[in-house]
Image (tube, rainbow, N blue to C red):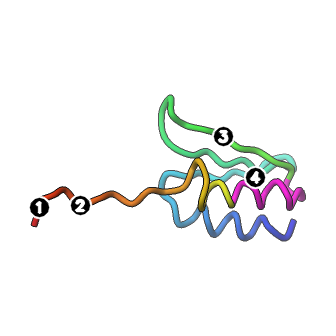
């Protein structure tokens, strides 16, 4: 339960991520349309929530900054 606040902070910084808490489960939805992925865990499962945070920050669902187009001002 201690990591759910950290997950909320990570999700709040990402416009492509939606976080839901319902019925003792926390779910995050990453991306849009058919590319959207959903990760879920029990709200008190700190280990799984920490893994979700790691995936959002450094793993498969990490935000990749857009590169400036070459020659653009």
From the image, which quarter does the C terminus lie in?
Answer: bottom left
Callouts 3 and 1 close, C-beta under 8 Å: no
Residue lying furthest front = 70
From the image, which quarter does the N terminus lie in?
Answer: bottom right
Residue 63: x and y in percent read: 49, 57
Q: Earlier in the sequence, mark 2 or mark 4?
A: 4
Residue 48: x and y in percent read: 82, 54
Classed neighbour count for the residue bearing mark 2: other residues with Cα under 10 Å, few (<14), some (14–19), many (≥20): few
Classed neighbour count for the residue bearing mark 1: other residues with Cα under 10 Å, few (<14), some (14–19), many (≥20): few
Residue highlighted by disc 4? 21
The numbered dot on residue 68 is 2
Disc 2 versus disc 4: nearer the observer = 2
Residue highlighted by disc 1? 72
* Mark pair 4, 1: CA separation: 42 Å
Give, as a single range, the part of the protein colored magenta.
43-53
Question: Along the line of sight, which residue is nearer the eye, 70 or 37?
Answer: 70
Residue lying furthest top = 34
* Mark pair 2, 4: CA separation: 36 Å
Callouts 2 and 4 close, C-beta under 8 Å: no
Classed neighbour count for the residue bearing mark 4: other residues with Cα under 10 Å, few (<14), some (14–19), many (≥20): some
Q: Earlier in the sequence, mark 3 or mark 1?
A: 3
Q: Is residue 50 within the magenta segment?
A: yes
Q: Earlier in the sequence, mark 4 or mark 3?
A: 4
Disc 3 versus disc 1: nearer the observer = 1
Residue at the spot x=69%, y=60% of the render? 53
The numbered dot on residue 38 is 3
Callouts 2 and 1 close, C-beta under 8 Å: yes
Disc 2 versus disc 3: nearer the observer = 2
Residue 25: x and y in percent read: 82, 48
């Amino acid at each position: 339960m201690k990591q759910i606040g950290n997950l909320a902070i990570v999700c709040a910084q990402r416009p492509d991520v939606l976080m839901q808490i319902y019925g003792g489960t926390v779910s995050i939805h990453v991306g849009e349309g058919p590319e959207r992925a959903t990760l879920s865990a029990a709200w008190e499962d700190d280990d799984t929530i920490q893994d979700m945070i790691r995936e959002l920050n450094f793993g498969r669902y990490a935000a990749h900054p857009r590169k400036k187009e070459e020659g653009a001002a």
